[in-house]
Image: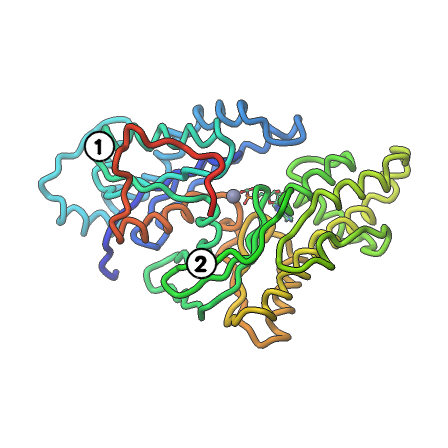
Amino acid sequence: MLPYIMILLAIDTSCDDTSASVLSDDVILSNVVSSQIEIHQKWGGVVPNLAKRAHIDKIDNVIKEALTVLNPKSEILKSKQSRNSNTKTQNDEFGGEMEKIDVIVVTQGPGLSPALGVGVDKAKELVKKYKKKLVAVNHIKGHLLSVFLKSKQDDLREIDLPALALTVSGGHSMIVRILPDFKYEVVGTTLDDAAGEALDKASKLLGLGYPGGPIIEKMAKTGDINFLKLPRPMKGHKGFDLSFSGLKTSFYYSIKDWSKEKIEANVENLAASFQEAVFDSLMGKYVKAIEEYETKSLIGVGGVMNNETLRQKIEKTGKQRGLSVYFPHSKALNGDNAAMIGMVGFYKAKRGQFVKDVDSFDRDARLEL
Ligand code: KG4
Ligand code: ZN
């Protein structure tokens, strides 16, 4: 095993997944994600206070499970023990594994404020109790750089830069240039709803479940994308910004007088038409940005990148232009997860960017990229 610089514990509770991850530098050792889908499903969307309560219930066990990778038999621990041979093992609620952690990383925002607070409070508690350093990370930056995460030390994630990333989730939709040294430049962003949010709302309108993205994808497979004529918001506009709220309204008015039976009879076609309108709008601006900016690679990240149709559109765009296309090395890294937060934390820690005043550190639900 190659030498590592630090062992990190990362926590993300930004929305409806409780997640903790252990990394050695930018390599994932464990990445535990406990989804709350079942809790929110009956409400048709995430209920912030229920999310908070579920995070509180789950966080300790999720952290414990992530830490088990540092059990005494692991290779990582052997080398770490020789480095920290003077540290006494604490047999407390985290099984003494906390002593092997160098840095704690937590998502500061953006996200749902009550949900974010649980992760931030837990990180502060652990930092103080075990005398660790704290790094705060922007959740969108985690998604953006999730493509660089490694599954093992000798993983090759050499991505030719500058790259143009399309990052789309339930909370954001952005086109971002990634430059050497992880510098970045936001090229375009949504002016209202995120692409995943639009899919979730369309699913609700069709009487399908939550989260809508995967359900719409399944339905759309056998549907006709030309069944319903829907607008392509921002198409004629200058620049690279996106908008999905008008599309959602237009979809609503198209079917508002339809009976339940008529909607049910056409649900695949409606799902296909709506999904196509969302992805066509995304790709229209993305391709325009590829043509405008010098780009060597294309990157697709965020929860909506689980969608095969969208992945294929990006693959095709790359192929046509001779550009390499990258997604995170596993689909589990598209959605919310703490590993991506830990990786950004690693780079910040390497530069010494720690939280200076832990007591006054707080979440920021509207933190900008
Ligand atoms: O990144 P993520 O897990 O959480 C946020 O930061 O929002 O993304 C969740 C979003 C939801 O809107 C969900 O409907 C969407 O990603 N999503 C999908 C698919 N899987 C998840 N959208 C389209 N197709 C999918 N297969
Ligand atoms: Zn996210």
Q: In this view, does 136 lie to the left or right of 304?
A: left
Residue wearing tag 2? 184
| Residue 101 shows in the view | yes
| Residue drawn 43% across the image and 44% down it | 138
**Which residue corresponds to the image point at 28% horizontal and 27% vertical from the top-left?**
93
**Quarter of the view holding residue 308:** bottom right
Q: What residue type is labelled 2?
A: Tyr
* Side (left or right) of 165 relative to 261: left
* 89 lies above or below 29: above
Q: Which of 25 and 113 is in front in this view?
A: 113
Instruction: Choose between 239 and 60: the one closer to the eye.
Output: 239
Residue positioned 28% across, 47% down in the render: 353
Amino acid identity at mark 1: Tyr
Ranked by sequence position, the earlier of labels 1 and 2 is: 1
Most extreme residue toward the left, as rendered?
86
- Give the quadrant of the N terminus: bottom left
Q: Nearer the viewer, mark 1 or mark 2?
A: 2
Q: Is mark 2 on a helix, strand or loop?
A: strand
Residue 330: x and y in percent read 49, 55
Q: How crowded is mark 1: few (under 14 residues within 10 Å), some or many (20 or more)?
A: few
How many residues crowd mark 2 within 10 Å: few (<14), some (14–19), many (20+)?
some
Give the quarter of the image for residue 280: bottom right
Tag on residue 224? none
Q: Estimate the x, y position of residue 2 in percent, counting from the top left.
A: 25, 61
Q: Looking at this view, name the residue that lies furthest to the bottom.
A: 322
Residue 28 drawn above or below residue 162: above
Classify mark 1: helix, strand or loop: helix
Residue at image location 61% in from the left, 48% down from the top: 190
In the rendered view, tell whether residue 90 sits above or below residue 234.
Answer: above
Please give the residue where the numbered disc 1 appears in the rendered image.
130
Name the residue nearer the viewer: 78 or 27.
27
